[in-house]
Amino acid sequence: MSGASRVMLVVLTVIAAWPLLLQALHASSPELAVRFVVVAQHWGARAGVGLGVAAAIALLLFPPAPAWLRRFVERTRSAWTVDRAPLLRALQELQHFESAQRHYEVARMAWIRSDLGLAGPHAARAVQLDPALPQSWHLLGQVLLRAGDPRQAAIAFHNAGRLEPGHAFGQALLFAARATHLAGDVPAALRLFEQHEHQHGGSNRSHYWYGDALAEAGRRDDAGRQFAAAAAPPPQRLTAEENWFRALARVRCWRYRRSA
């Protein structure tokens, strides 16, 4: 279970326990229950004011905060609303018959639930059983990248792209570029970003990542153009992920203008 899921679990547990707690207090002492509610309302109001002040400070210190919150809520919602029954069924089937496809399905469903501890081993087992499945390599790369191992993630994404050029509508190539950059090979990353842009166009995420690599390479003007493309007003509502990268790009553009 991810950290976000644990936080949500604690919050939901507290909310669910509230009526039971009030009922127990009222049964023992109605007066005590009333006093408890009054005190809770008092501190709840203070907490609300505190949260409002914290939100205002967050916006001042970190302007992309609303976009981050939207992405956080979306990821948490996806992790909590996906039906767990198919995952349990797939795990049970693996006990009777093991195959690369079944391991991939378990890893995919675990990934949706943000359960890296379950997704990683099954994705790794899938590529071990059948190294010719590009989707397994791609998913393994995603898990490795989020787990903080960009070097091995880059290898996984390269394998996915080698087996199926243009895999996942160019996402394997894009993530290979990002992982290569994070692994420290900026020149190779720039070549991959350029290849991705030439073959698949750009998105808020790809423009931002490309600009990030260009900035590290010292190509300030080219980086500024990529950040500007990532920050441009969208023709339609963006997904939470793409909106997050647009928000980051707007901050980078603002900083570039200030330092010009």
Image (cartoon, grey):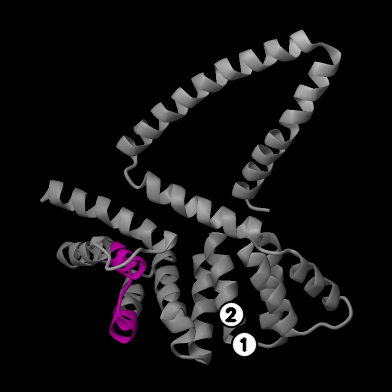
Closest to the observer: 145 or 91? Answer: 91
Residue 199 location, quadrant: bottom left
Alpha-carbon span between mark 1 and mark 2: 7 Å
Structural crowding at the residue carrying mark 2, measured as other residues with C-alpha within 10 Å and reported as few (<14), some (14–19) or many (≥20): many
In the image, the segment drawn in magenta is 194-213
| Residue wearing tag 1 | 133
Magenta stretch: includes residue 197: yes
Q: Main secondary structure of the magenta part?
A: helix
Q: What residue sits 28% from the left and 61% below the top?
A: 216
Marks 2 and 1: in contact by CB < 8 Å? yes
Side of 70 relative to 190 (left or right): right
Q: Residue at x 18, y 68 (%)?
A: 222
Q: Amino acid at mark 1?
A: Leu
Extreme residue in the left direction: 260
* Disc 1 packing (10 Å; few <14; some 14–19; many ≥20): some
- The residue wearing badge 2 is 137
Which mark, by number, is residue 29? none
Front in this rendered view, residue 217 or 4:
4
